[in-house]
Image: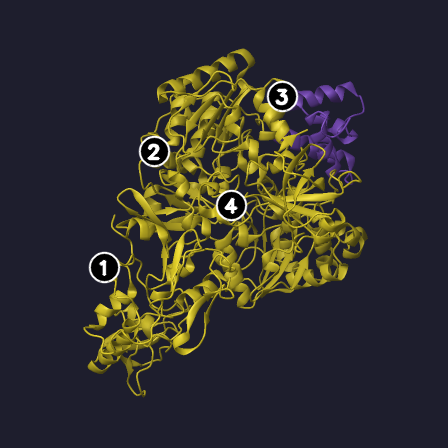
Chain colours: A purple, B yellow
């Protein structure tokens, strides 16, 4: 799947995660979760949470860790 | 209001305290050291006759009209070039001086056409005025001798004529072109009687380097350089002070009119952003406001394939309200949203976000700053605590080193570009970081110390390398950092790691390590060093990271909180700053306060009478994605042509085509309106009443010179849509909207139309603590308390050149055109730039068999378009450049979905492309 075909919430969350790849993973997950919480519309967060639950490997592990810190969207 | 004529003091003001006391015609005046006798006289109400002197140019002493007598001095010196001295006694009016002046005027008039009654400058001619002032009654020399009366008129410029027969060779135009504009396109050719003004090497103005800023026209004391609009329409008889609607410099202008017809726009000397200067757009390109393409009546259609149907306002607004409610009923409250415009006033933008939040009931509001300076908002808020530049424009006059990154001020912010050039001519040093060799790198009397020709997409690697040099070479301002900042120790460890050294990143950035080290030493060692940046910073996948990297650099070197320093975004459109200030982002209420803040939300809920959504809404790219997903179906677009300006045209048009209701409010039918169901005609800046906020946070009044041609102000339309949706939203006038902004937004607490009319302009924060506004921020402390160092890992963009797409495309703008060109393409400015061109290095062209002017295909992985090539040695090998001013080119057909990780600002500056020879063909998407 090309970048253009990757669902936007997956592409964008992975792009956020890569900014924190050299940081402590727990701290990075907190930062990513805070960023998504502050800037993402609830429907995008809901899709991200759904895909994190699916565990199909498309999400960066830091994003998966961040989603565990996000409240249910809605 | 009658015609505003600013008093001309003859020579520029000198800085410093008024310590020198002189007596002029019996009046005593105290002025700063270095002040001319002419200016001192003007300051005590005595205007000495003059022709070659004017107070925005250094004295020249050529016309010999301003002669005075000074006790104890021989002869009659020119008052413009004679500085005052303590105790000096001056006489400006004696019989001998009167005789001398009449003699001078006789000589001038003996070689000047005697056509005053039919001259376009009749009534606005300093030569005519001075003839009267000196009492000229005869010309003893006659008019039959050798003269210049048959010299031809140069009408090559679309906006003004150069009638050489009327020239008095005072050099004001030549000096204005050099001293004010900094272009040096004009000169005096020949000597003595043969002296004449020449453009460039003696060709026409259009053949020369003239940038048509109008400084020469303004400086001309006769009708030699005259606006053609004055020739055609006659002299204006009234003025309205207002603010330019083009770039983020926000120049103040006098709109000069005859009745309701604008004759000319003249830069206002007391305008704090421009101090009497202008560029070709603001000075001349206002004709679009009365262009026959203006759509002045609302239009509606059921499907985008239907023809438009003109309707009354009531029907159009009722239709929008009803359809928006129907979409929400069927698909939920979050299925609709709005986009505000940086071309509209603060008041117009404020009501759009209020409509979305209070009437739509969600936070799906965004603004075109999303695609330009949203990373500035994010980056400066993270580091300094507020989403704005730190300085006023005037601050650069105190800069010793100017670091310009990813900005091209002489094209995109020309009036500020001229101010920068003036400071550079005074001796400040320049560092340019840009893939292209922009004009500032080398132009007349300007030479950058360092041109860091950074590869597109590698800005963060560069700024990290500069930070590395600062830390490892002992250039940190430890005292500043200790007193004012936090998280420095962690940043110091991070940035001093070997992988950030200039040597380590040389292969990434393409810049020799020694050059980076030398440039950094220059920046860090300066007494005052400032950073100016533009979209070459923000429009990257790491745009926000780069903003934070620059903020780190300024803090580490102590270059924050005083004149001459700072980190300063050069905003693209006139009201980008204001549209962001007004709460146009989906996560922020006015004043950059997050929607999740219960206290802030409570302020608005109490005033607006609605419960507000505490969740962030959709950004523009998210809106497009949601539209394609079927969850976002109704969009109100205020004054932005998103189809032409936003990246990946195919994606944008697919999103719009999927919506059930697209409402476009604009001056002209545009590319976006092809996908619209409702078109609501907007107003030009000449019809608006409100405020714009420029890049230095300066809030300027925009005053109407005529009633709305459409019958409604844009804020009225928005209020009526809200009312049609059942939300009572009403204001008596725009001033009332600003009063509400001041009531709800602490940084605007002291702002009102009355206040602005009183003081001219203020820079926010303007409140009880700073009633006069705040030219320079973070003086005693950062807005967030301590400045925060942020770690800025360099992460390469995913957009890479490949075998198939081996070149990198960057996009930008050019001096004569503005944004999507909707305004400037409908003016004479197209004489300079009638089409978008692809700039390409000679090597890249040669290996592809491409010659200058050839038509080529420009293709990326998402689309292809066609345009002509301009071979340009200022381009680096491997990088091509074009503008996005013309819809026929459709430059954004090829740009991609890549965006800044933090803000979704599109990565316009890095697109992998291929260029190949082609016969002309229209733009298309794959």
Mark 2 or mark 4: whose residue is earlier in sequence? 2
Horizontal and vertical percent for residue B891?
61, 38
Within 10 Å of disc 3 (Cα), the crowding (few <14, some 14-19, many 20+) is some
In the depicted structure, whether residue B650 falls above or below residue B59 = above
In this rendering, the label closer to the viewer, 2 or 3: 2
CA separation, marks 3 and 4?
A: 32 Å
- In the displayed structure, does residue B740 sit left or right of residue B911? left
CA separation, marks 2 and 3?
A: 36 Å
Within 10 Å of disc 1 (Cα), the crowding (few <14, some 14-19, many 20+) is few
**Count of marks placed on residues:** 4
Q: Which mark is residue B709?
A: 2
Q: Is mark 1 on a helix, strand or loop?
A: helix
Within 10 Å of disc 4 (Cα), the crowding (few <14, some 14-19, many 20+) is many
Horizontal and vertical percent for residue B544?
64, 42
Q: Residue B628 carries which label?
A: 3
CA separation, marks 2 and 4?
A: 24 Å
State the residue in front, B765 or B166: B166
The lab-note entry on whether marks 2 and 4 share a chain reads yes
Q: What element carries label 2?
A: loop
Horizontal and vertical percent for residue B366?
54, 31
């Amino acid at each position: 799947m090309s970048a253009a075909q990757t669902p936007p919430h997956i592409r964008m969350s992975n792009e956020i995660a890569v900014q924190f790849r050299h940081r402590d993973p727990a701290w990075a997950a907190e930062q990513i979760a805070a960023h998504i919480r502050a800037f993402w519309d609830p429907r995008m967060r809901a899709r991200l949470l759904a895909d994190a639950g699916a565990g199909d490997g498309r999400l960066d592990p830091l994003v998966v860790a961040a989603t565990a810190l996000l409240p249910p969207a809605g | 209001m009658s015609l505003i004529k600013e008093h001309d003091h003859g020579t520029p003001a000198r800085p410093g305290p008024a310590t020198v006391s002189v007596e002029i015609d019996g009046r005593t005046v105290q002025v700063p050291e270095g002040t001319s006798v002419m200016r001192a006289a003007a300051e005590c109400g005595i205007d000495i006759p003059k022709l070659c002197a004017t107070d925005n140019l250094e004295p020249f002493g050529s016309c010999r009209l301003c002669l005075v007598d000074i006790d104890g001095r021989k002869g009659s010196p020119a008052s413009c070039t004679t500085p005052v001295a303590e105790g000096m006694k001056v006489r400006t009016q004696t019989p001998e001086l009167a005789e001398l002046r009449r003699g001078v005027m006789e000589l001038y008039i003996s070689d000047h056409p005697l056509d005053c009654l039919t001259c376009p400058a009749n009534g606005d001619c300093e030569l005519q005025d001075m003839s009267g002032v000196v009492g000229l009654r005869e010309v003893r020399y006659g008019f039959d001798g050798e003269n210049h009366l048959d010299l031809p008129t140069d009408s090559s410029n679309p906006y003004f004529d150069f009638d050489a027969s009327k020239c008095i060779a005072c050099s004001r135009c030549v000096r204005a072109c050099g001293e004010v504009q900094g272009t040096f396109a004009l000169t005096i050719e020949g000597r003595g009687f043969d002296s004449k003004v020449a453009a460039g090497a003696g060709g026409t103005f259009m053949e020369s380097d003239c940038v048509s800023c109008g400084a020469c026209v303004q400086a001309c004391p006769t009708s030699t350089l005259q606006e053609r609009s004055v020739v055609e329409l006659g002299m204006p008889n009234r003025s309205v002070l207002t603010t330019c609607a083009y770039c983020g410099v926000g120049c103040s202008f006098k709109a000069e009119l005859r009745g309701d017809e604008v004759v000319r726009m003249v830069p206002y000397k007391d305008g704090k952003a421009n101090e009497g200067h202008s560029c070709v757009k603001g000075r001349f390109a206002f004709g679009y406001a009365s262009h026959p393409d203006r759509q002045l009546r609302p239009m509606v259609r059921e499907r985008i394939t239907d023809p438009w149907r003109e309707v009354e306002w009531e029907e159009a607004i009722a239709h929008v309200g009803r359809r928006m409610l129907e979409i929400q009923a069927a698909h939920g409250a979050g299925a609709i949203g709005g986009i505000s415009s940086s071309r509209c006033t603060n008041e117009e933008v404020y009501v759009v976000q209020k409509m979305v939040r209070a009437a739509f009931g969600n936070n799906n509001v965004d603004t075109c700053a999303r695609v330009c300076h949203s990373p500035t908002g994010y980056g400066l808020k993270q580091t300094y605590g507020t989403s704005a530049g730190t300085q006023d424009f005037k601050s650069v006059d105190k800069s010793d080193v100017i670091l310009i990154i990813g900005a091209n001020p002489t094209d995109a912010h020309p009036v500020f570009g001229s101010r920068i050039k003036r400071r550079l001519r005074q001796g400040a040093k320049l560092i340019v970081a840009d893939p292209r060799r922009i004009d500032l790198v080398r132009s007349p009397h300007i030479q950058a110390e360092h041109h860091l020709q950074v590869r597109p997409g590698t800005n963060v690697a560069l700024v990290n390398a500069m930070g590395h040099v600062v830390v490892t070479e002992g250039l940190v301002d430890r005292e500043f950092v200790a007193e004012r900042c936090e998280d420095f120790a962690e940043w110091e460890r991070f940035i001093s790691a070997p992988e950030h050294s200039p040597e380590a990143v040389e292969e990434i950035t393409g810049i020799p390590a020694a050059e980076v080290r030398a440039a950094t030493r220059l920046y860090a060692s300066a007494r005052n060093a400032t950073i100016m940046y533009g979209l070459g910073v923000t429009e990257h996948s790491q745009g926000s990271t780069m903003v934070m990297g620059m903020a780190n650099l300024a803090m580490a070197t102590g270059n924050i909180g005083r004149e001459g320093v700072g980190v300063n975004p050069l905003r693209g459109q006139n009201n980008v700053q204001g549209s962001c200030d007004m709460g146009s982002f989906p996560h922020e209420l006015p004043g950059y306060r997050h929607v999740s803040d219960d206290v802030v939300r409570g302020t608005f809920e109490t005033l607006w009478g609605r419960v507000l959504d505490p969740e962030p809404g959709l950004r523009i790219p998210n809106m497009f994605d949601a539209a394609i997903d079927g969850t976002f179906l109704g969009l109100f677009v205020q004054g932005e042509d998103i189809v032409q300006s936003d990246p990946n045209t195919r994606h944008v048009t697919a999103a719009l085509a999927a919506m059930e209701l697209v409402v476009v409010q604009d001056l002209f039918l545009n590319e976006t309106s092809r996908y619209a169901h409702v078109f609501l005609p907007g107003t030009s800046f000449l019809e608006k009443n409100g405020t714009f906020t420029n890049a230095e946070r300066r809030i300027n009044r925009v005053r109407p010179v005529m009633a709305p041609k459409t019958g409604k102000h844009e804020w009225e339309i928005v209020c009526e849509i809200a009312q049609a949706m059942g939300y009572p939203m009403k204001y008596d006038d725009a001033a009332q909207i600003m009063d509400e902004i001041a009531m709800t937004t602490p940084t605007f607490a002291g702002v009102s139309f009355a206040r602005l009319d009183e003081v001219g302009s203020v820079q926010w924060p303007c409140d009880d603590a700073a009633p006069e506004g705040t030219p320079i921020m973070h003086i005693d402390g950062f807005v967030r308390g301590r400045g925060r160092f942020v770690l800025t890992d360099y992460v390469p963009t995913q957009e890479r050149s490949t075998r198939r797409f081996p070149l990198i495309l960057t996009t930008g703008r050019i001096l004569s055109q503005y944004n999507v060109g909707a305004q400037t393409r409908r003016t004479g400015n197209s004489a300079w730039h009638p089409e978008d061109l692809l700039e390409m290095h000679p090597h890249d062209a040669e290996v592809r068999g491409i010659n200058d002017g050839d038509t080529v295909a420009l293709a990326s992985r998402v689309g292809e378009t066609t345009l002509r090539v301009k071979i340009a040695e200022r381009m680096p090998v491997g990088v091509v450049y074009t503008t996005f001013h013309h819809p026929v080119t459709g430059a954004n057909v090829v740009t991609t979905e890549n965006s800044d990780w933090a803000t979704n600002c599109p990565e316009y500056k890095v697109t992998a492309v291929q260029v190949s020879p082609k016969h002309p063909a229209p733009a298309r998407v794959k």
